[in-house]
């Protein structure tokens, strides 16, 4: 057996290169490869971090428009005409459908008839009022003139009575005096006649004296009879006084009657006021009938459902023959020119977002992104408008990041017609001071589109 010391020395094996040793050692290779990848990704990581710090990004975004539900207003009934289908383009004022107008046409005819009756009644009251306004002053004037004439007749009768009384009293007085004088003459003549008769019998005086005395005696008796007759005639004139008194009483009665006629004629002014009130009532009834007619005409117009603006029909809820209740949607339309994106951005990413900032919009339905700009940042979080807002007053509180709605204008391109409301989107908002003036003008343009102003 050969001893180890007696064996020859082995030949040394050459050492492989470093790269081969690294390649053959998997752990070392993995470490080196990882380090190289990390070193190569550092610039990209720096760029990505810088990008995230200068942009706000969210997937909570949707394409929106103003969807308007068109429903029957103030009227209801069966749809007798349906003139558009879903996806049809419509123009402002275009007839979309018609609700059965017959009952509303009948109501309009009834309202028109009531208005005609009210107008006829008003015309009658106005004619009555016009007649009274012309007639009453004339009747009053005539009554006043008759009263003036009656007063004048009464005054004349009074004056005539006074004159008649004076004349009759004077004539009677004169007649009485004449009778008294005639009696005195008769007494004297009677005494002379008796004396001359005695003297004639005694043949103391001539016959001629006796005859003269007899003549004077008879003449005086005749004069007495005439005086008494005149007195009787004068006393008979007292009937004229009574007649004058009766005439005065009649004129007084006529004056009183004329005064009452004036008062009665003046009552006509109250009739004028009553006619004016009746006229006002009839006028109010005409106005009421006119309002009912306007309402009936408006209701009849509501049976024709027309487009409020240019747009497209997005949905039909009622078909021909369906019953359309008041306020229940028949169609849903929207303005194809008024489309925008609403992005619900976390409150932690609001810093740097301003109206006018540029935005990249990645709509899931399209390969290429859209461009846009921020129009405004909401003034309240979306949670404030939820149906059941959170109540943390009882102390059960878990902090949840709130989201604020951001409206974003979309730059139109050839894909605009295919961009429909409701599509999901992701938005990337550039940070910066923005352009408030541009945002104001863009918002005004959208408001004009919404109101239909060209």
Image (spheres, grey):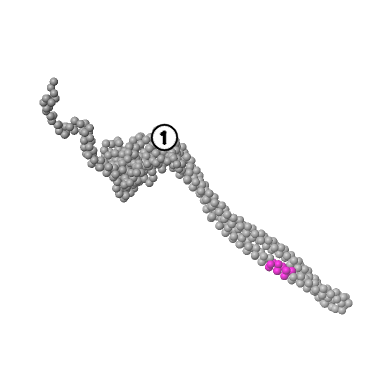
Of residues 341 and 224, which is closer to you in this image? 341
At 54% from the left and 52% from the top, the residue drawn is 276
- Quadrant location, the N terminus: top left
Q: Where is residue 3? Give x, y as percent.
A: 13, 23
Of residues 45 and 300, which is closer to you in this image? 45
Q: Where is residue 88? Give x, y as percent.
A: 33, 36
At 32% from the left and 49% from the top, the residue drawn is 436
- Residue extending farthest to the bottom is 204
- The span picked out in magenta is 162-172
Q: Count neighbours of disc 1 (C-alpha within 10 A) and say few if under 14, some if 14 to 19, many if 20 or more.
A: many
Looking at the image, residue 28 lies above or below residue 385: above
Position of 66 with respect to 187 (left or right) is left
- Residue extending farthest to the top is 1
Q: Is residue 329 visible?
A: yes
At 41% from the left and 43% from the top, the residue drawn is 384
- Residue extending farthest to the right is 202
39 inside magenta stretch: no
Looking at the image, residue 18 lies above or below residue 280: above
- Residue named by callout 1: 79
Q: Where is residue 32? Give x, y as percent.
A: 21, 35
Q: Where is residue 376? Give x, y as percent.
A: 34, 46
Q: Main secondary structure of the magenta part?
A: helix
Mark 1, secondary structure of its residue:
strand
């Amino acid at each position: 057996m050969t001893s180890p010391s007696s064996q020859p020395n082995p030949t040394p094996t050459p050492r492989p290169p470093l790269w081969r040793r690294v390649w053959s050692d998997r752990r070392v290779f993995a470490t080196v490869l990882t380090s190289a990848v990390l070193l190569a990704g550092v610039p990209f990581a720096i760029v990505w971090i810088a990008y995230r710090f200068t942009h706000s990004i969210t997937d909570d975004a949707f394409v929106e428009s103003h969807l308007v539900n068109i429903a029957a207003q103030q009227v209801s009934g069966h749809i007798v005409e349906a003139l558009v289908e879903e996806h049809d383009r419509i123009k402002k004022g275009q007839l979309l459908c018609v609700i059965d107008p017959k009952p509303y046409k009948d109501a309009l005819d009834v309202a028109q008839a009531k208005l005609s009756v009210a107008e006829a009644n008003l015309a009658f009251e106005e004619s009555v009022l016009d007649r009274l306004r012309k007639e009453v002053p004339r009747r009053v004037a005539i009554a006043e003139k008759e009263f003036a004439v009656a007063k004048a007749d009464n005054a004349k009768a009074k004056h005539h009575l006074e004159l008649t009384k004076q004349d009759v009293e004077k004539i009677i007085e004169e007649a009485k005096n004449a009778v008294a004088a005639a009696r005195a003459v008769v007494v004297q003549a009677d005494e002379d006649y008796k004396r001359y008769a005695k003297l004639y019998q005694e043949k103391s005086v001539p016959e001629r004296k006796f005859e003269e005395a007899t003549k004077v005696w008879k003449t005086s008796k005749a004069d007495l009879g005439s005086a008494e007759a005149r007195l009787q005639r004068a006393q008979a004139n007292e009937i004229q006084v009574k007649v004058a008194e009766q005439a005065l009483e009649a004129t007084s009665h006529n004056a009183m009657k004329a005064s009452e006629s004036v008062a009665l004629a003046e009552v006509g002014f109250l009739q004028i006021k009553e006619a004016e009130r009746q006229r006002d009532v009839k006028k109010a009834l005409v106005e009421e009938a006119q309002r009912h007619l306007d309402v009936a005409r408006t209701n009849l117009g509501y049976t024709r459902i027309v487009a409020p603006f240019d747009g497209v029909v997005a949905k039909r809820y009622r078909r021909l023959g369906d019953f359309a209740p008041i306020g229940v949607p028949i169609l849903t339309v929207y303005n194809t020119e008024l489309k925008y994106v609403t992005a619900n951005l976390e409150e932690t990413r609001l810093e740097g977002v301003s109206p006018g900032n540029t935005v990249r919009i990645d709509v899931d339905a399209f390969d290429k992104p859209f461009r846009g700009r921020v129009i405004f940042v909401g003034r309240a979080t979306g949670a404030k408008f939820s149906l059941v807002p959170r109540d943390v007053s009882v102390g059960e509180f878990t902090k949840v990041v709130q989201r604020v709605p951001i409206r974003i204008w979309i730059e139109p391109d050839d894909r605009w017609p295919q961009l429909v409301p409701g599509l999901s989107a992701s938005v990337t908002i550039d940070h910066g001071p923005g352009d408030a003036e541009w945002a104001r003008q863009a918002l005004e343009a959208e408001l004009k589109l919404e109101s239909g102003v060209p």
